[in-house]
Amino acid sequence: MSKQKIKVIITKVGLDGHDRGAKVVASQLKEAGMEVVYLGMYQRPEGIVKAAIEEDADVIGVSYLSGEHLVYTPLVVEEMKRHELDDVLLIAGGSFPPEDIPCMKEMGIDEVFRGGSLTKDIVDYITENVGKKG
Amino acid sequence: MARLKDSPDVMVRKMLSGDRRAASRLITMIEDQSELSNELMKLIYPHANGSTVIGVTGSGGSGKSTLTDHLIRKFRALGKRVAVVAVDPSSPFSGGALLGDRIRFQGHALDDGVYIRSMGSRGYLGGLARASNDVVRIMEAMGFDVVIVETLGAGQDEIDVIHVAQTCLLVLTPGMGDDIQAMKAGIMEIADIIVLNKADLDGAEMCLRSLQAAIHCALGQEEQSWIPQVVPTVAYASRLEDIRGIDELVTAIQDHQLYLHESKAVEEVKAKRVEQELALVFKDEVERLVFNGLRGTGKKQRYVEAILEGKTEPYSVVEEVLATFLKGDVVK
């Protein structure tokens, strides 16, 4: 039994107010036929996971642009674990040093897309990996 | 992707006992019109009754979500548990959707007494999604006291919400036309409460009078029927103290609910909803049966060709097909 539409939560976490990138990605995933729930800025990990549960989301996409990725990633991952969201993909996009990527993956992010990534890469990654986790 | 980890029976029992993940997955199954959806709805339906269902409709950008946010807060303060179905349009080209209503509900992001589900319309006309009514039924079964149904941006004729909600709010803003617009049929007629939002804008006073005049003109058919209230509001302002009319709106909703229950009109509203559900399920099932029956026979293609060649037309074809089916050879 496969789902008709891929549902994606796009959000920012913490106090960073740069939302242009998140909006661009949300809009591009919509163009790719996905249903995108846009949560916007200033979210807390608990709120993001509550939304993912209520929306029965397949993917959570978090946008980081202010160097907060190593602080918030473990909190989001922990909250996902607490609610057993083990089949939901967690992806991150934005601006962070390449040397942080192994650490982010170690923390539990499934894939990262730095500035300069192509929309197609994000869409392909989601399409190929959705439903395979957990 | 959507997998039903347990049997329908177990999933429904989990949902009834308050398991949100089970509930959310059930909603997805219904939304996707999975082959299990009929079976699931049969199990859910007997538990789905008793919520106050409030509809919120109006044009895109009129303030439906922001008002809904205020309503959630007020109902929570009254100790009610609140669920929201928020519909936004799906793209007719990609099939995707940007569901942006949740961004207005951030004040409730951590409140377990609130459950919010966004839905893409997926090509369904009428201001809601095909599955919206069933989703409201699921939320009723989950035991929410209040269910708010927020339509996509609706113009003049998207009135399906009236079949789902007991109390219908139509959100308007100043500057959307003259008094003739207010007198037109369609969406203007379904409102139990007209909310004139952004009432701090120029022209609000005139608009308010036009609406009241239009309602007054339309009165007089039935003596006891409810007279739609017009409530001016300012749902968003940069200073909190400039927000206006929210308490009055909640009072109007409570007055309408009181009217429905005292006049027994609520029974009529419930009966109409069931009638509409029945029609919807009938239409879907007959269509499904007929098309499934025709599948693989090559008949559908032959009908299309015959119509193109001018040998027949759709009306005779449907009569012929239905006559065969209704004899009972194919319909089991």
Image: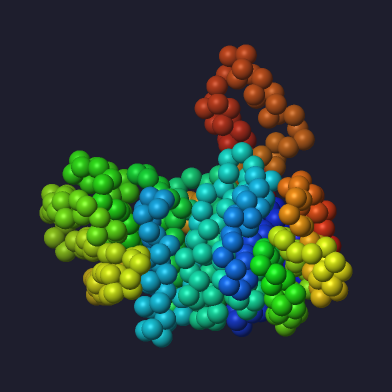
Residue drawn at point x = 38 percent, y = 83 percent: B77
Q: In this view, does B265 lie above or below B94?
A: below
| Residue nearest the observer in this picture, B92 or B294 | B92
Residue drawn at point x = 82 percent, y = 69 percent: A100
Q: Position of residue A78 (x, y in %)?
A: 74, 81
Q: In which quarter of the image is residue B157?
A: top left
Q: In which quarter of the image is residue A11?
A: bottom right
Asked whether residue B82 is in view, the answer is yes
Q: In this view, does B92 lie above or below B106?
A: above
Q: In which quarter of the image is residue B297?
A: top right
Give left or right: position of B209 versus A102.
left
Residue drawn at point x = 73 percent, y = 54 percent: A115
Q: Is residue B315 above or below residue A74?
A: above
Number of marks in picture = 0
Q: Where is residue B137 in the image (x, y as percent from the top left)?
A: 51, 67
Q: What is the residue that sits farthest to the bottom in this orientation?
A: B79
Give left or right: position of B203 versus B127.
left
Q: Where is residue B35 in the image (x, y as percent from the top left)?
A: 70, 56
Residue drawn at point x = 42 percent, y = 81 percent: B76
Give left or right: position of B272 versus A88.
left
**Render colour scheme:** rainbow
Asked whether residue B143 is in view, the answer is no
Q: Where is residue A62 in the image (x, y as percent from the top left)?
A: 68, 65
Which quadrant, please, contains the N terminus of chain B?
bottom right
| Residue nearest the observer in this picture, B201 or B73 | B201
